[in-house]
């Protein structure tokens, strides 16, 4: 869908809900936050992509036309279909999503029992090593009994968990159980014990075993702290299987 906006017309307003993405093909717009002008954007600019992906529920800025503007409007469904057809385009969105959620990621790492109370420098270094991936609805994040050595964190979106083909629960980033594969990243398991399938667009972070080991070796004090907690944490994790 294409729509023409007149000068001073608002394309989107900060705080409003919305799931459409706008591609500015002609004209220029003003970006405002908290009533203050932030920047002007020209044609070939995309706005609203975070809401279209589901990263944000509300618009984080007001977009106001400075000139006559022509925008192509893409719904969330349109975006998902496009990413299905052109998977190479996901990398751009993965980079943007990772940047938007880096602060929240460090806070979530601080809540993980094994590395809670580790130094901020260690947690920041570790978070910077995590791999980022967009998983589209209907696609698997991990599969039961498939080999893997990474711990997985769900940044946004919802996913269904299955064991032996049976649905066991639906998870989202606000659940306590939004991290999987902790035994795998510790080298205690070589396969995943459940299947996770995205039912919305999901942004997922992966922490592989070798990355965790390499990063830990750089911080001797944090490594010692983790070492003291490791036996008890393994017992706790195995009791849940």
Image (cartoon, rainbow, N blue to C red):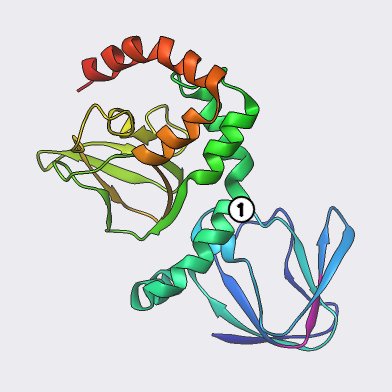
Considering every residue shown, the one lying at the far right of the view is 36
Q: Is residue 121 visible?
A: yes
Range of residues picked out in magenta: 26-30
Which residue shows up at 28% across the image and 28% down it? Answer: 183
Question: In the image, residue 16 lies at what x, y percent?
Answer: 68, 56
| Image quadrant in which the C terminus is located | top left
Task: Kindly indicate the quadrant of the structure image that contains residue 80.
Answer: bottom left
Question: In the image, residue 31 lies at what x, y percent?
Answer: 80, 67
Q: Nearer the viewer, residue 189 or 200?
A: 189
Task: Kindly indicate the quadrant of the structure image that contains residue 181.
Answer: top left
119 horizontally vs 133: left or right: right
Q: Residues within 10 Å of mark 1 (few under 14, many from 20)?
A: few
177 horizontally vs 139: left or right: right
Which residue shows up at 23% across the image and 18% down it? Answer: 238
Residue corresponding to mark 1: 99
Question: In the image, residue 59 lies at what x, y percent?
Answer: 67, 57
Q: Is residue 24 above or below residue 97?
A: below
234 horizontally vs 117: left or right: left
Q: Is residue 11 magenta?
A: no
Q: Is residue 142 above or below residue 79?
A: above
Q: Nearer the viewer, residue 36 or 177?
A: 177
Q: Is residue 184 above or below residue 42?
A: above
66 horizontally vs 196: left or right: right
Question: What is the tally of numbered marks visible in this picture?
Answer: 1
Q: Is residue 87 above or below residue 234?
A: below
Element marked by disc 1: helix
Which residue shows up at 21% across the image and 38% down it? Answer: 192
């Amino acid at each position: 869908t294409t729509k023409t906006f007149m000068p001073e017309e608002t394309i989107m307003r900060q705080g409003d809900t919305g799931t459409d993405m706008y591609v500015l093909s002609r004209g220029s717009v003003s970006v405002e936050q908290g009533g203050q002008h932030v920047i002007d954007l020209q044609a070939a600019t995309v706005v609203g992509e975070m809401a279209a992906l589901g990263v944000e529920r509300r618009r984080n800025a007001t977009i106001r036309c400075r000139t006559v503007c022509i925008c192509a409007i893409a719904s969330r469904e349109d975006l998902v279909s496009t990413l299905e057809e052109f998977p190479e385009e996901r990398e751009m969105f993965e980079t943007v999503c990772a940047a938007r959620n880096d602060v929240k990621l460090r806070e979530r790492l601080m809540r993980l029992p094994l590395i809670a109370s580790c130094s901020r420098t260690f947690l920041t270094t570790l978070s910077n090593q995590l791999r980022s991936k967009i998983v589209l609805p209907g696609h698997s994040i991990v599969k039961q009994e498939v080999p893997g050595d990474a711990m997985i964190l769900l940044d946004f979106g919802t996913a269904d968990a299955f064991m032996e083909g049976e649905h066991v629960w639906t998870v989202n980033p606000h659940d306590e159980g939004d991290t999987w594969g902790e035994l795998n990243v510790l080298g205690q398991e070589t396969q995943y014990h459940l299947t996770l399938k995205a039912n919305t667009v999901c942004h997922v972070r992966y922490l592989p075993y070798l990355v965790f080991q390499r990063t830990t070796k750089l911080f001797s004090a944090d490594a010692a702290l983790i070492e003291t907690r490791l036996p008890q944490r393994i017992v706790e994790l195995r009791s849940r299987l």
